[in-house]
Amino acid sequence: MGAIAGILIVVAFLAISFMFIIKRDDDVYETKKKIEHLFSHSKQFKSLLEKEKIDAWKAVEDPRGYFGKRLRNIIKEIEANPVAQKEINDSIELKKQFNKDIKHERELSEKELVESNIQWSVFLNDVRITEELKKAIKDLFIPLNISPYLFGENNRIINDGAFYSAIPPVYNGTLSIKKFANVPKAYPNWFAAAFPDVLVWFMDNLADSNSEISKIFSSVDAEEYIENNIFTFSGLIKLVNLYKKRVGNSFECQISK
């Protein structure tokens, strides 16, 4: 009987330990979701982390450590602060409204989608198009339904009258393109014109040394994506895929099917 009792105690202990581990993993997962949310909508959260030199993604994995506890306290402070919550709610509503407006403006018919692909085909046969841009059209723009008209408008803003100005001025550029005085040298102009929202999102996250995105592109593996401080084509595709994975929104220049 003593042996059986001992076995039962061990089993009970293991069960409790297992439940604790599951709960800890759930807590970490929920905290990670909150961090992603706050990074997207709260400047105050980013400011507090930077001020206290807290690496959020490292701290969250050590909930009992000093930085882990401090991280959770900062999250609680933000959640309890009416001003911080207003900033977050305003940011969320602005994003919703913008996405709603974008969806409304991009609901084009299948016929218009075909016409866009025809326009890209015209671009591909233009001798003034670089080989890199042709590759972008074939590998990114056409598969992702990037509008040649929106691309042209954004490119017009960037280049101030490049040959794309032959495209009818249907729009006056997308929201994110207007945030650039100049396109950073690390990115080609065509990428900024087609994916300005991706570029803004990436630069915001890259500026935050605590972000997961910053870590990805500051690691040794980043050599595949950045060469001589300029993004390779593989690096640009990586940015687009990360945006789709992390943000999940359609692109500003994308045509809705």
Image (cartoon, helix red, strand yellow):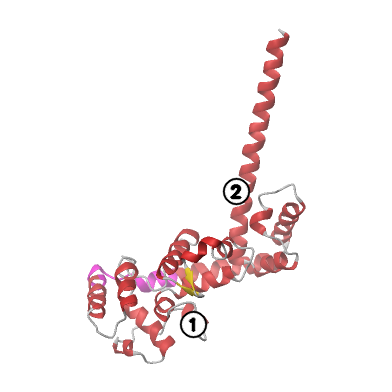
| Distance (Cα) linking label 2 and label 1 | 36 Å
Q: In the rendered image, which quarter contains the C terminus?
A: bottom left
Q: Is residue 95 left or right of residue 207?
A: left
State whether residue 187 appears in this view: yes
Residue 122 point in image, percent of width and height: 23, 79
Magenta stretch encompasses residue 104? yes
Residue 100 point in image, percent of width and height: 44, 69
For the view shown, which residue lies furthest in the bottom direction?
161
Residue 234 point in image, percent of width and height: 41, 66
Q: Is residue 38 left or right of residue 182?
A: right
For the view shown, which residue lies furthest in the top direction?
1
Write down the residue under mark 1.
Answer: 183
Query: Who's the residue at 72% across and 52% down the image?
Result: 68
**Residue type, mark 2 in image:** Tyr
Query: Range of the magenta residues?
Result: 100-113
The residue carrying pointer 1 sits among few (fewer than 14), some (14 to 19) or many (20 or more) residues within 10 Å by Cα, namely some
**Residue type, mark 1 in image:** Val
Name the residue nearer the viewer: 94 or 130: 130
Vertical side of 41 occupied by 164: above or below = below
Write down the residue under mark 2.
Answer: 29
